[in-house]
Every structure is written in structure tokens, then in C-alpha cells.
Image: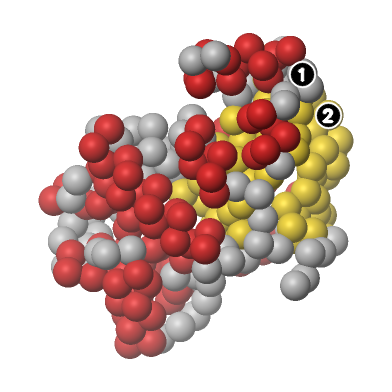
Amino acid sequence: MDREPILEVRHLSKTFGTNPVLKDINFEINQQDVISIIGPSGSGKSTLLRCINLLETPTAGSILYRGRDITELGKDVYSYRAKVGMVFQSFNLFDNLTVMENCTLGQTRVLHRDREEAEEYALQILSRVGMAPYCNARPRQLSGGQKQRVAIARAMALDPEVILFDEPTSALDPELVGEVLDVMRDLAGQGMTMAVVTHEMTFARQVSNRVVFMDDGIIMEEGSPEEVFTDPQNERTREFLGRYLGR
């Protein structure tokens, strides 16, 4: 199996005004990694994903995709985002388009597939996430969990190498969380490379191969789920997990 890094984050910093949100972040995402990024609110987790996806411009440092610095991509950013997809907390579907249109738009515009091919592929992907029966529905007709499954299908339809998930279940009613986590578990089981900002500690513990704990814009601790959850080395990690796990 190829364990070469797909993405390498090197000395990444991000400042908003005078507020440093990320401070000298270093980590990498390898083929078939499932990385859970955990930590308190405001620790920089979502900003890290947004920098990797170029929704935010890093203040300093570099992000390498297959060895190439993505901050120098210019107009190539759309083809990069096809390869490094993102699923958002608030779904970010196009409300005026059907489920099918949401899943074909990127294919036709970015990958230049013809409409028939794009629809056929979208239907395959929607079937994988249990949303094929809703292909003619619009987002307003769907539950939060269904919208998030469509958002995952939309990202997958572009054949990404990595999908970034930014708190994908935090906007959902508790009873809908499971259906989205089940889809993500299936993706992980099929070898999809994923980085997930999450408060779902069971998912982080059971599905990830690496856990990154962030606090105050810094990676405080990183390791296997076993290492981080059962023997955390950092006092802040112990405090955080103690609150979440009721220690």
C-alpha cells in the first residue's frame, strides 16, 4: 500500500487581524489515513481544514499536495478541490438545484464529464449513501442527515483522494448523527483517505488510525487512538478527554 503523504502541512500559521489562530502546525495525511482532529471549540481545528482546502489563505508556511505547494495554484484551485474535497458542518448544498444536479455540477464543470456520464456516476454514488431515491428532491425537502449524505456524495462524485470533514454531525439532531457516521465508517472501510474534525469520540476511537489533539492553535498531541485515548501524554489532552469521557 502506498503510504506516501498525499498532503504535507509545514509550519502553517494563520492570523486573523492580530489574533493567531494556527501556530506552526506540522502534520501529514497519508494514503488511507483516517485522522480525527479533536479539541475544544476555538482551538483552530476548522481553520486548519479551511486552509488545507484554500478557503482561507495561510499567513505563513506551506501545504504540499503530492509535493506541490498548493498556495501557488492560482486558477487550478478548482481541480485541486476536486482531489481534496470538503464536507461542511452546514451542508453547503445548492438549494435551487436537485440532489442529482448538486452531484453532477462539479463533474461537468471541473472534470468535464458529459451530462449522461455524470448522472450515471452520481446515481452510483448516491446509491452508496442511501440517497438514490431522492435524486429529484431539493435540499429543503430533506432532513439534516439526508442533506449531509448528499454533501458526502457530492464530494465523492469528483473522485477525491482525500475528503476533509468539518464537524459533519454537529448541526444534526442527535437521532440523525448515526446515519452520517455510518456512511463515514463505510467510506473508511473502503479505504477512503479522510481528515475529520469531530466531537464524536466513539468515531475517533473506533474508526481513526490517527488522532490529533489541538488546543490554542497548536497540535498538542498526536498518535494512534489507543495512545491518545488510553495514555495521553499531555495534561491538556487528559483534561479534555476527562470531560468528554467522564473520567
Number of the label disc, if any, that sits on residue 24: 2
Which colouring convention does the figure follow? secondary structure
The quarter holding residue 26 reads top right
Does dot 1 land on a helix, a strand or a loop?
A: loop
Depth check, front residue: 21 or 39: 39
Above or below 126: residue 71: above
The quarter holding residue 81 reads bottom right
Residue type highlighted by circle 1: Asn
Quadrant of the frame with the N terminus: bottom right
Give the residue drawn at x 66%, y 62%. 32
Give the residue drawn at x 71%, y 42%. 224
Residue 144 appears in the rendering: yes
Residue 7 locus on image (x, y percent): 75, 55
Residue 74 locus on image (x, y percent): 71, 57
Q: Is residue 9 left or right of residue 96?
A: right
**Residue bearing the label numbered 1:** 234
Quadrant of the frame with the C terminus: top right
Give the residue drawn at x 79%, y 59%. 5
Residue type highlighted by circle 2: Asp
Number of the label disc, if any, that sits on residue 193: none
Tell me which numbered mark, 2 or 1, is placed earlier along the sequence.
2
